[in-house]
Amino acid sequence: MEFDRRSSRDRILKYLRVILIFSATIGFITIILEHGFRINFVEEQVINILSVAVVGIFIFYQVANILFAVDKISFLRTHFFEFVVILFILIEFVLTVFGVSIIQNIGSTLDIQNITFLYVVLAQIYIVIGIMLGAIRYNKKILESKIHPARLFMLSFAATILGGSLLLMLPAASNIDGGLRFIDALFTSTSAVCVTGLTSVDTAADFTRFGQVVVMLLFQIGGLGLMTFTTFFAIFLSGGLGIKEKFILREMMHEDNIGAIGKVLSSLIILTFFLEGVGATVLFFSIKDFYTGNIGEAVFSSIFHAISAFCNAGFSIYPNNLMNPLIQDNFVFTTTVSMLIIFGGLGFTAILGLPRYIKVNREPLFARLNMSLQVKIVFIATLILIIVGTGFTYILELNSSLKGMDTGDALFHAYFQAVSARTAGFNTIDITLFTDPTTFFYCFLMFIGASPGGTGGGIKTTTFTLVFLSILMYRNSTRDLRINKRTIPQEVVNLAFMIFWLSVLYILSGVFILSISEPGVKFIDLMFEAFSAAGTVGLSKGVSGDLSDMGKIIDILLMYIGRIGPLTIIFSFIGERDSSRFSYPNDNITML
């Protein structure tokens, strides 16, 4: 009898699950139709009815699951969000009967005349969140699969890029007649997800607000990684991760302490939203006076640029990027953007550990730093590159892109470009006016990039430091690389050289192919374009928008490889081989 009851319950839930998937698909399509296409009033009303019906099915499914659940407390704990929504709907229904509807009061407070519109918006929000929750829970199954972590990392970025491309091709996403071409949508989506900032179309003029929101969401997801986002919310919803999931995430996040994966992941997301929120607030107050009567535009601009800066994406909704007269000499805005770029590029390991690095001595006004070697390298290398970059930019561009500015303004813009050049791609001066020496020097900065665990690209400051110091200290009698009374393992040094030379190889290959596909463009400008794409920087000397389709494909590949990392791609296809159990005789090869 008990077996028959359980069998009937499972069969009913199976049928309901099929109906739920069908309803979720309908709900997703209705949202895409309403916001991605230009529809008439009748079509909008039909879509609204379907949206409310889908919400009803969602709720019915959750209620059925609660009733059939063997351990109802455990089920409610793992489906807390759905339970809260159902509880809210029941309360709203009761209050509406007594004439004190919460939603109607919200509509009155916000001066929304059409309350039905508010109901539909909330219904669509619930549909989107419901679909996301389903995907997030499915993410745990993916983590439990046998897919190699490197392949999982690559596939998550590829899937996000493809999804973003399809959204950007929707008619309502752009102001271009006939919609955005697939190659341009793919280029923009890749640039956003890989937090680059190169564009083949004008983000300010060619995208609608819907398109700009899509781009913003893509570089927010790309800055942290799709798996990071979904896993964080999986922890939030289900209360933890399994041991296998932690091992996979340890490989993807390069975190040694497997027990701290959940805590690190949560801290990473919270820190990101906190810094972006603080940055957006400062940006808002720096520009709100220029948006009299249109505060909503100022709010969106502040959020967009704060996320773009922290994620080192380099996208802007202003014509001519930050050279726009509204922004160029707004030093509060540009300074805030530069600080967000630096924080995003430092890496989460360095930022999260800042409070514990500083140990105050008993003597007042004195403190000593207790940092790991990696963090010291990150901070010192970042500081040196900013100072050197500022100095070189100022000296080399004083009679070119900085011409006509007073000393203070010229130094500030030189500083901003030195910060932006390694990771972000914002510009407050005209990059097309750069002299050839500056162009070549910026290729060097873009090649180095950000630091490990940061949102920027490049070979990373630590990799460059190890390669540079290994060459510098080669004549050391011990032949070991020693830094700050620490010996760097030889396998780590070998890995640094592998990353260095693989990066040189694929970037120069990109330059070579671009020189063939774009015969009318100066070689040094194509080299600058390739280094910018591979370093996920986003600066361009006016080349990106005029590239042929083949040139755009090369840029897309460079951006993707630059964000994923050449070693990650190699390791995803070539398994590790243990050769430690045997060795061959040594032999010498003459090189000089």
Image: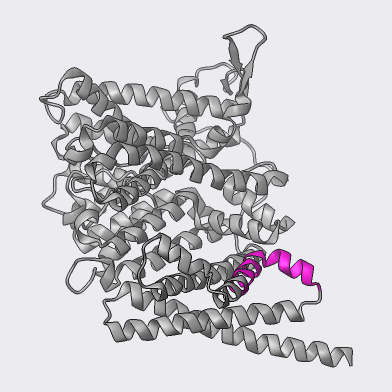
Residue 353 visible, this angle: yes
Which quadrant would the C terminus be assigned to in this image?
Answer: top left
Residue 327: give x, y in percent of width and height: 23, 38
Residue 427: give x, y in percent of width and height: 24, 38
| Residue 311 in which image quadrant | top left
490 to 480, vertically: above or below: below
Q: Residue furthest right?
A: 1
Q: Residue at x 74, y 86 (%)?
A: 10
| Residue 417 in which image quadrant | top left
Residue 536 visible, this angle: no
The residue closer to the viewer here, 269 or 394, is 269
Which quadrant would the N terminus be assigned to in this image?
Answer: bottom right
Instruction: Please give left or right for residue 324 compared with residue 339 in the image.
Output: left
The residue closer to the viewer here, 342 or 545, is 342
Specify start and end residues of the magenta stretch as a single range: 71-90
The residue closer to the viewer here, 381 or 32, is 32
For the stretch drawn in magenta, the main secondary structure is helix
